[in-house]
Amino acid sequence: MESDCLLPEALMEYASGHTTPADSILQALERDTYVNVLCPRMISGSYQGRLLEMLCRMIRPKRVLEVGTYTGYSAICMARALPEDGRILTIEHNEELRERILQAFEKAQVAHKIDLRMGEAELILPGLQAGGFDFVFLDADKANYRNYYPLLKTLLAPGGWLLADNVLWNGKVYDPACHDKDTLSVRGFNRAVQEDPEVENLLLPVRDGLMLVRKK
C-alpha cells in the first residue's frame, strides 16, 4: 500500500521520469482504481511496479506469495517477470474487489499464472506449504505486519526473498511520539527483522520504505 513519499516531490518526479513507464494496460488499471475504488493510493503504481518486476527478473522465482492484492497491479507486474511455469498466490481480504482483480488479470494475460485467494491472510497463511515460496511481497494491513513476519519466514524457501512495503510508514516509525497500532506493528516488524540471525536485510528508503530480506 502506498503512503506519502518521503522524497521531495520534484526528486521523485525526476526518478519516475528516468524509469521505464508502465504500458497502457497498467495505466488503465491505475486510472480505473483512482476513479472507482476506495483508497486508490494503496495501489503500487508504476514506479514500485517496475521495481517489483525488475526484482523478479533478477531473482527468477518460480513460486511467489503476495499478501495484499488490492486491484492486482503489483501481481501483474510480478507475473510478467515469471517464467511460463511460474506461479503467484495472492491474498486479498476485500471480497468486493474479486471481479475487478480477475478482470485485470485477464486483460493483462497473466491469469494463468495467478491464484487469487480471498480471505484474511492470518487464516490462509498457516495452511500454506512451509518453504514453498521463493519470493514474498508483503503489502497488507500494517496492524498485522509484526504477526505476519514469523509466518512468512516459515513459508520462504532457504535463500528466498521477502519484500515488505511501507516500512517507514510516512516517517512515523522513527518518531517516538507515534504510538498508534499500525506504527507499533511496523516498528515491531522492522525490529524483528533486524534482530533475526536467520536473515539478511536491507531497508531501502524508496517511496515509503521497502524492507528487503533474504532467508539464509
Image (cartoon, rainbow, N blue to C red):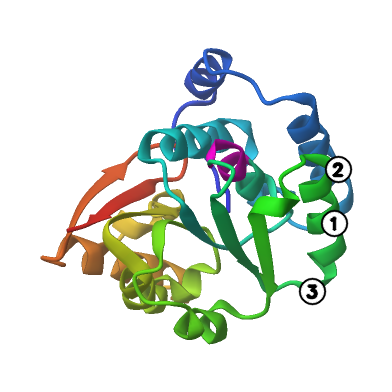
Residue 147, percent from left and from top: 39, 79
**Marks 2 and 1, how far apart at CA:** 10 Å
Q: Main secondary structure of the magenta part?
A: helix
Earlier along the polypeptide chain: callout 2 or callout 1?
2
| N-terminal label among 2 and 3 | 2
Residue at which label 1 appears: 100
For label 1, count other residues whose C-alpha is less than 10 Å away and answer few (under 14), some (14-19) or many (20+): some
- Residue under numbered circle 3: 95
Name the amino acid, label 1. Answer: Arg
Determine the residue positioned at 53% across, 18% down: 19
Q: Quadrant of the C terminus?
A: bottom left
Q: Place residue 90 in its image quadrant.
A: bottom right
Residue contact at pointers 2 and 1, CB within 8 angstroms: yes
Magenta run includes residue 116? no
Highlighted range, magenta: 77-82
Disc 2 packing (10 Å; few <14; some 14–19; many ≥20): some
Q: Name the quadrant containing residue 35.
A: top right
Which residue in the structure is indicated by mark 2?
A: 32
Report, in whole angstroms, how far the alpha carbon at label 3 lies from the one at label 1.
10 Å
79 within the magenta span: yes
On the image, the x and y values in percent for residue 36 come to 89, 51
Residue 132 versus residue 135 in the image, above or below: below
Nearer the observer, 136 or 176: 136
